[in-house]
Amino acid sequence: MFLIVGQGNPGLQYARTKHNVGFMVLDRLAPPASYRLKGNALVAELAVGEEKGWLVKPTTFYNATGEAVAPIARFYKIPPERILVIHDELDLPPGRLRFKAGGGNAGNYGLESIHKHLGTSAFHRLRIGIGKPPTPEEGAGWVLSGFRPELAPVMEKVLEAAAQLARDWVSEPPEKIQQKYNGLNFAPDTPQAQ
């Protein structure tokens, strides 16, 4: 079994914000109406070939993601290496994505929460670029705002690639996923697209 976790905030006011790209990817893997409330998460089943697993959208808010993920992982006895967390990344420009097996949390409070509640950072991550705010002080407003309209085609390609990566991740080794996806660049030619 496996878990694919989308990071984001519950509620319609957050639905199209940069912080919710994880939820956006999960909605491409299963229709929103197929998710059911289980504990602190909206959960849908996903079958990829012979493998079956769960898509998880926490209802705990972004910074407390671990409170939703850890109980589901324990209940289904899913090891951290079979957990993929999809989240936004300030250090990547829009149009880029990056897969990583394990590693640090780089100041992402949602990842820190998962690490704390699982007791390990060995889970896998898919980082989706949202770019940096104009100043560090604008970070909170930046992640809770939407993408500029002209970036819609770019984000459409990124979200489709991310959904395909998640499907491939179920049965392919991490090294192959990195080779296949980490070099993709859907970014426009502008220096720092917002």
Image: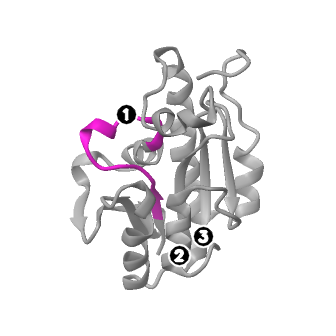
Q: In this view, does 86 lie to the left or right of 17?
A: right
Residue type at mark 2 is Lys
Q: Circle 1 — which element?
A: loop
Question: Tag 3 or tag 1, which sits nearer the N-term?
Answer: 1
Which stretch is magenta?
4-19
Residue of label 2: 116
Task: Tell me the quadrant of the picture where the C terminus can be found.
Answer: top right
Crowding at dot 3, Cα within 10 Å, few <14 / some 14-19 / many 20+, comes out as many
Residue 86 in the image: above or below residue 45: above
Distance CA(mark 1)–CA(mark 2):
28 Å
Q: Please tell me whether mark 2 or mark 3 is closer to you in this view.
A: 2
Distance CA(mark 1)–CA(mark 3):
26 Å
- The one nearer the camera, 60 or 150, is 60
- The one nearer the camera, 115 or 39, is 115
Q: Quadrant of residue 79?
A: bottom right
Mark 1 and mark 2 residues within 8 Å of each other at the beta carbon: no
Q: Where is residue 95 in the image (x, y as percent from the top left)?
A: 63, 30
**Could you tell me which residue is drawn at 73 percent across and 47 percent down?**
180
Residue of label 3: 123
Question: Tag 3 or tag 2, which sits nearer the N-term?
Answer: 2
Reply yes or no: does residue 145 show up in magenta. Answer: no
